[in-house]
Image (tube, rainbow, N blue to C red):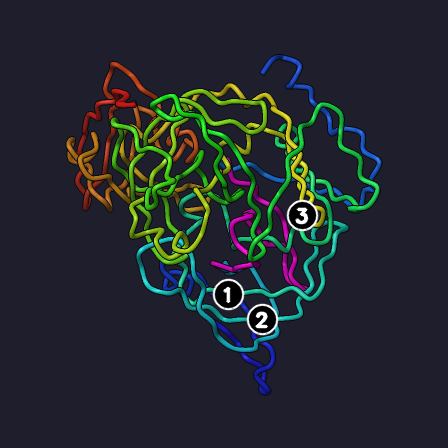
Amino acid sequence: MLHAIADKSIFYGIIRHSFCRKWGVFIFAFSFIFNISANTKGKKIGSIPFESVGSYIIVKVRINESSALNFILDTGVRNIVITELMPEDSIALNYIGETNLHGLGTGNELNAFSSKNNRITMGKVKLENINVYVLKEDIFNLSKHTGVKINGLIGIDFFEDYLVEINYSRHRIRFFENEAFKMPKGYGMMPISVEMRKMYIQLSVLETDSTSRNIKMLIDTGAELNAWFQTMTNESVQLPDNGVQGRIGHGLNGEVTGLFARIPQICIGKYCLKNPIVAFPDSAAISDIIFGSDRDGTIGSQILSRFNLFIDYKNKRFYYKPNENFNKQFTYNIAGIEIGQTVPLFPQTEILNVWKNSPAEIAGVQVGDQLVEVNDTKAFQMKLSEIKMLFETPSKYPLILKLNREGVEIKLKIEMKNKL
C-alpha cells in the first residue's frame, strides 16, 4: 500500500505482495573469451557488476534512501520506471502527480505516479535530479517472466552524465568521464543520433533479394530479441516469405505480436551476423511510434550482447567489439510456450501464453497450466532460462511435458521441428 505523509509531498512504496498482484501483469574465436576491458585515457568514475538474465542486464539501484532494487538496463525508455515492489522493498519519493506513458503495444495508455528530484546511487556512482515513475498497474510482470526479482526499468538517465562501458564478457559496467576518452584498441566506432533522448545507429542489412541497404535502428538493451523492423512504409525491410507468427513482447501500451523470420544478414560496422532471426511487428502495435519517423526498427539485447560496448551519449559515439557470444546460434520459441516462475525457494512454473497455431497449441497446452516436468526433469529444479532453452531447441524427438491442470496431471508431446 502507499502511505502518504500529511502534506502529500512524499509517498512511500512499501507494498505488500497482495497489492503487487493487483498491479497486474511487460534482449568468436577463443581469444575473445579472455577479453579484458580495454585501456582508456578517460578517468574512471565507478564500476558495478551486473547479472545477466537471458540477455537482460540487471543492475542494483538505490533511489534516495531506498533498499537495493533490481532494475533492467533499458535504453529504450527515457526515465526510471518502477513496475513492482516486493514486501521487503522500501522507497520514499517526492510525489508531484500522475502522468501517462506511451510506447509499443495495442492496449491503452499506461498510468503512473510521477516523482522529481530523486537521487540514484549505483555503487559509487550517483545521479541527481532524476525523474521516477511508478506504474499504477504492473503490465510487465517482469519478476514472473524472468524468474528473478525485478523492480523496474532504468533508461537514458543511466548514460547522460558519463561514458558507459557495458562488458558482457565480464558482466560489468564501468563509468568514465566523457572528456579525454580515447577509442579503445580493437573497437569499431560509429556515430549515434539522439532524438527525444533516445539513441539511434545506422546498420546495414542484406535482404532476401540480395539488396544491401542502410537502416536506422533504436538501441534498446531492454528488448529481449535480436531486432525488429517496421513494415509500414515503402522503405521497410522486405518481409521474408517464410515466417512464424507469435508474440514478440509487451510494450508500455500492450501486447506486441507479429512475424518471426530470418533475413540473410545484419551488420554492425564490418561485423556481420548471418541469417539472424528477427521480428516484424503487426502495424497496429507500432503505428504511433513509426508515424512521422524515419526509424526502421530496433536492435535488441540478443544482438547487442554479442558485443562489448562503450556508449558515449554526450559525444554521440558508439564503440563495439565482438565477444565470445558473437557466433552463438540464433533461436526462437519453437514450442510457442511462454512461461512464468514465482521467485520463492521452491518455484512454480506456469504457462502464461500459448502462441496461436504453435506446436504447443496443437498438442493441447493451455494458459494457466502448471508445468510439473520437462523431459522427466522436475520443473522446480530448473531455472526459467533452462526451460526456455529447451523450448527453443529443435529436435527430431518430441518434447515431453507433464502439466497440472486444475489438479489433474496430464502428459503432452510437443513437436520441435524448426520452421525457420
Magenta segment: 55-84
Outermost residue to the bottom: 7
Q: Is residue 96 above or below residue 250?
A: below
Judging from the image, what secondary structure is the residue with disc 2 in? strand
Spatial CA distance of label 2 from label 3 is 24 Å
Residue drawn 66% across and 67% down? Answer: 118
Please state which of residues 193 and 21 is positioned toward the viewer in this rendering.
Answer: 193
Please state which of residues 413 and 315 is positioned toward the viewer in this rendering.
Answer: 315
Q: Which residue is mark 2?
A: 115
Q: Kindly identify the amino acid type of the residue bearing the numbered disc 3.
A: Tyr
Q: In the figure, residue 353 lies in which quadrant?
A: top left
Residue drawn 17% across and 35% down? Answer: 357
Q: Nearer the viewer, mark 3 or mark 1?
A: 3
67 within the magenta span = yes
Spatial CA distance of label 3 from label 1 is 25 Å
Q: Earlier in the sequence, mark 2 or mark 3?
A: 2
Q: Which residue is mark 1?
A: 134
Q: Earlier in the sequence, mark 1 or mark 2?
A: 2
Contact? badges 3 and 1 (CB < 8 Å) = no
Q: Earlier in the sequence, mark 3 or mark 1?
A: 1
Q: Kindly identify the amino acid type of the residue bearing the numbered disc 1.
A: Val
Q: Which residue is mark 3?
A: 313
Contact? badges 1 and 2 (CB < 8 Å) = yes
311 relative to 244 in the view: left or right:
right
Q: Position of residue 49 (x, y in %)?
A: 67, 39
